[in-house]
Image: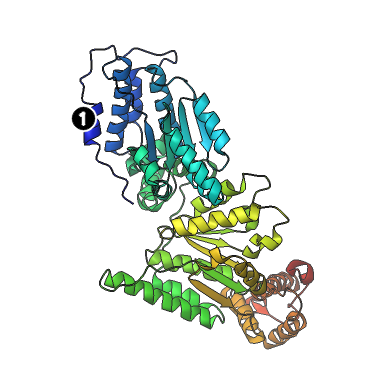
Amino acid sequence: MNTNYDFSDIYNDFFGVESKNINKEEVTSKDISYKDLIDKIDNLYLNVESKNLLKKIVEYMRKYNEKIENNYITFNISLEGYDKDLIKNIEDILIDSSALYKYVDKNRLSIISLYDVGISELDKAYEQSGVISIKDINGIYLKDTNEQIKFIHSFIDKLKFNNITFVSGNKDEINRLFEDDNIKDNFIFNLVEEKPSIQQVNCDILNKVNLNDKEKIELLDYISKDYINSDDSYTNYVNRLVNYISFNKEIPKLENTMSMDEIFKELNELVGLDDIKKTLYDLVDLISLKDKTKDKLKLSNINLHMVFLGNPGTGKTTVARIIANILYNLKYIKTNKLIEVTSKDLVAEYVGQTAPKTNSVIERALGGVLFIDEAYALSSKNDSGNSYNAEAIATLIAAMENHRDDLVVIFAGYTKEMQDFLDSNSGIVSRIGYTLNFKDYSEDELVDIFKLMTNKAGFVVKDDAIDKLREVIREYKDTKNFGNARFIRNVYEKTVIKHASNTKDKKSIKLLSTITKDDISIDNILKDSNI
């Protein structure tokens, strides 16, 4: 939806009167002057049009206070942006300017989250405060339909009061809010966040850390390559980098981007997973075709939200990481990141905390892949009588829809439990584009996985060691919760430890690098593998 409006008529009507000569150093009880306000606006990370608009709003308040203007305008202002410092600075400007020019009756700011408030709380905020800052817009849409309609109608009524309403959120949230024309028509004052330049970021970080000349060059080189692809808010990006440098006493290393050949080499080195590999090759071909043909072929948008079905240790997390590499390489996602979480990272313990907690995870994953392991734990069957899990699912569904061009969500878990979870929630199912089945590994495949691990570490494995390994696999393979490749990883690690003990008095490189049957170990394997 286009949220850019032509303000020319409004400016002519409301901002066209020339200013009287006033003392612009005049201060309020908070020692805030007109010049201070303008300087603050100039320092905001907003685009030029937004800065000019905010200045004109402050100027109009001044004119109204001096009775140059007689028409009272209810300033309902939206910000397309989510940087915490930017939001806080705009809140300060609005409350300070309204206090300086006595534009609202109550010189008080209320900050409210739509995740936490109902109609009564909203009423109270508008009764007690002159400036209301509203965040977490998607909270409206987590309410049931009737309550949602009542809340929106009440909100629209309040926008006509003599208050200043400031709403902030990312582009998708603002656009969704403005799908209601009655709300959109009340918000004709729209601001847009502008990402600071590389030099601004560099200067801000240099002001907070001490670096030598070589490190300063490294920092600028890092920011030049990393910042442009970052979806972090400016404040988070700077703080994260400052904290890293302060703690590690070094500039972080840039992630090496893998070529498509390197990615598929890694994929093809995985044991088994033939059906999965074919699906990924087909997916790459489809995305490439769509990209190369642009609008010449009428191809619908590709739905990449996925479900991974399979037992532990069947390669689900590994494949998810490869998918993130593939999609980043094809420029389908903006950042090469995979955010791995479980239901515990999404569901809170108290009322009103689950949606913000889930949204926090979603915001971290935007521009990349969100991998939710053991997702069946979100099923209503595991809800223990409360609605927190359902709230997390509703938040995820909203994100899958609203951010479908900026987020890939993968739900993963045991086949049976995940099937029950999907059967119980049509909202998830309707948004899934791919379902990948990860089969249990055969005995030969498990042996090949062990060989792959030892070969990468430089070991040679004798035939008698493989025979011993096969015996171990047969003993445990049909037990409950068998860990597949995870089980083999445990055997490998314990085998290396035992091999080190068995060869502690040896000096021969050949002996030190050879795994024999006496090295194959399953010490404490039951406890470590949860079998």
Seen in the picture, residue 19 relative to 91 is either above or below; the reply is above
Q: Where on the picture, by quarter, is residue 390?
A: bottom right
Crowd class of label 1 (few under 14; some 14 to 19; many from 20; radius 10 Å): few
Residue 413 visible, this angle: no
Q: Please, is residue 328 above or below residue 454 in the view? A: above
Q: Indicate left or right for 193 with 277 as reference.
A: left
In depth, the one of 52 and 507 nearer the eye is 52
* Image quarter hosting the C terminus: bottom right
Side of 26 where 158 appears, left or right: right
At horizontal 60% and vertical 73% (from top left) the residue drawn is 309
Per the image, label 1 sits on a secondary structure element best described as helix
Asked if residue 344 lies left or right of residue 306, the reply is: right
Q: Position of residue 273 (x, y in %)?
A: 55, 80
Residue 4 visible here: yes
Q: Position of residue 243 (x, y in %)?
A: 51, 41
Residue ID at (38%, 35%): 77
Task: Give the labeled residue for mark 1.
Answer: 12
- Kind of residue at disc 1: Asn
Nearer to us in this view, 330 or 143: 143
Report the residue at 76% width, 75% height from top: 480
User: In the picture, residue 285 is in which quadrant?
Assistant: bottom left
